[in-house]
Amino acid sequence: METVVTQGLELAELCAATVHTLHVVDERAYLTIPDEMRDQLRETLEEDGHMATKAVAERALNAGLSVVREVRRGDPSAAILAYAVDNDIELIVMGTHGRTGYERYLLGSVAEKVVRCSPIPVLTVAVGDVDVIKTDIQAGLCRDLKGVETDTGPRNQTDD
């Protein structure tokens, strides 16, 4: 997520914007866990969220930006959109793992749901090894790009 934070903070600096760092604990992820373990897991996940938002906030403060931190519980995409609307957010910056095909449908995609439903502009930033993603695209391994030709060779311009 380093790249996501860096991109978001660079944009915030350009606009002298307030940075809102939000972490949503997905309560649906542990509904099947026994009751006696659920509270402990919830606390652990919330603490992880507090640590993550604190790290972003520290970087933003070091860059001279104003910061608001929040940790919420619930459906991540719904909570992100509700927070953005409630706080008059002008741009949502979030990471995407770039899952395609069946992985996206089985695992869901918070970023995809936010992009699809958001009334606010959303900047998605690739999370993971960007070189591997580029190689996969060039090799035609991304199922969603099947049938799309990519030209990875040098381009020659002519003055026709």
Image (spheres, rainbow, N blue to C red):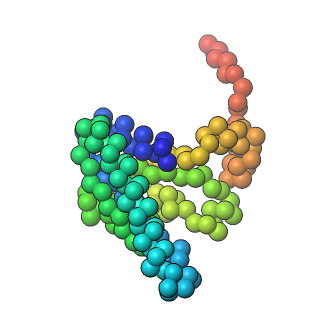
Task: Residue 124 in the image: state x and y as whole percent.
Answer: 48, 48
Q: Answer with the quarter of the image where residue 152 lies.
A: top right
Where 102 falls versus 152 (above or below)? below
Q: In screen coordinates, is 146 left or right of 25?
A: right
Q: In screen coordinates, is 32 left or right of 7?
A: right
Where 77 falls versus 53 (above or below)? below
Which of the two residues, 119 or 38, is positioned nearer the viewer here?
38
* Residue 44 visible in this rendered orientation of the protein: yes
Task: Tell me what residue is drawn at x 37 percent, y 55 percent.
Answer: 53
Task: Tell me what residue is drawn at x 61 percent, y 66 percent.
Answer: 107
Task: Residue 9 in the image: state x and y as whole percent.
Answer: 36, 41
Task: Tell me what residue is drawn at x 50 percent, y 85 percent.
Answer: 36
Which of the two residues, 122 or 79, is positioned nearer the viewer here?
79
* Residue 147 visible in this rendered orientation of the protein: no
Task: Residue 160 in the image: state x and y as whole percent.
Answer: 63, 15
Q: In screen coordinates, is 147 left or right of 39?
A: right
Looking at this view, name the residue that lies furthest to the top: 159
Q: In screen coordinates, is 14 left or right of 76?
A: left
Task: Residue 149 in the image: state x and y as whole percent.
Answer: 72, 39
Task: Tell me what residue is drawn at x 72 percent, y 26 percent.
Answer: 153
Which of the two residues, 142 or 61, is positioned nearer the viewer here?
61
Q: How many marks?
A: 0
Q: Answer with the quarter of the image where residue 73 lies.
A: bottom left
